[in-house]
Image (cartoon, grey):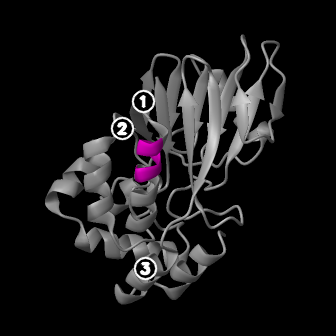
Amino acid sequence: MIWAILSDVHGNLEALQAVIEDCRREGTQRLAFLGDAVGYGANPNECLSILEELTDLRVAGNHDYGAVGLTDVSYFTPSARAAIEWTATVLTEKNRFSLLRFPLVERTGEITLAHANLHQPDGWDYILAAGDAEKSFLELQGKALFIGHSHQPLIVERKKEGRLSSREQEVIVMEEGAQYLINSGSVGQPRDFNPLAAYGLYDDESQKYRLKRVAYDIQTAQEKILRAGLPPSLARRLSYGQ
């Protein structure tokens, strides 16, 4: 079974559509979504409708819960808070109800999905390096934990004896007896200095994981952000992937 692992769409319809089309070309059989369908971008309703229709499993991100009052947004940056407050005003009732039902953690077979971490999924702590992953590995049952939140691709391997290390490759084959924490990057707002949309492909039979990058119409996404009256910085950053 080939899974597409998508995260952090953030209302960027152009990026999501390009990634979905790439998933079809890759022959993916199931789609998993790691949270933050909304926030920053100008098409939250359209993105939510696509994700509801096409994903087999989905979890909530802090922006998803923030848009429906399930998490505090006072710690958000001013631009992020402005975007989530705008999002809350434009969400349809159907999509608002949908976000209220998104769980924090999902499990199927040997894989687990969470937005930020597994040890405190509603605390939204970031995992940016191997050492940050230790607590989540203690909670992990199965082979792999897929997360988003940082918008930066990351692979952390935990050997059978407990040693943690970062894997720099964009393609890996998971080893027998090891566990993995994998961040598939962001579809809608990459922050690793690469503006191309990012998502992951995972084959649960061969145990192969691959990071994919996809070009999309950045200019149109930027123009929509500006027309919606959202902070211009949210449009500019799409050009630089940061």
Q: 64 and 203: which one is in front?
A: 203
Mark 1 residue element: strand
User: In what element is the residue under mark 2?
Assistant: loop
Query: Residue 73: x, y in percent?
Result: 45, 64
Q: Position of residue 181 (x, y in %)?
A: 66, 32
Amino acid on which disc 3 is placed: Thr
- Membership of 24 in magenta stretch: yes
Q: In which quarter of the image is the C terminus?
A: bottom right
Helix, strand or loop under label 3: helix
Residue 182, image quadrant? top right
What is the magenta range? 21-25
Majority secondary structure of magenta residues: helix
Q: How far apart are marks 3 and 2 (CA)?
A: 32 Å
Residue 9 falls left or right of residue 152:
left
- Marking on residue 106: 1
Residue 130 quadrant: top right
User: Front-most of 180 and 18?
Assistant: 18
Q: Which residue lies furthest to the left in this view?
A: 93
Q: How crowded is mark 1: few (under 14 residues within 10 Å), some or many (20 or more)?
A: some
Side of 21 relative to 212 (left or right): left
User: CB under 8 Å between callouts 2 and 1?
Assistant: yes
The disc at residue 103 is 2
* Residue found 39% across the figure and 32% down from its top: 30
C-alpha gap between disc 3 and disc 1:
33 Å
Residue with the most extreme front position? 25
The answer to whether 205 is drawn above or below residue 189 in the figure is: above
Per the image, is 18 magenta?
no
Question: Residue 134, can we see it?
Answer: no
Residue for badge 3: 220
Q: Mark 1: which amino acid?
A: Glu
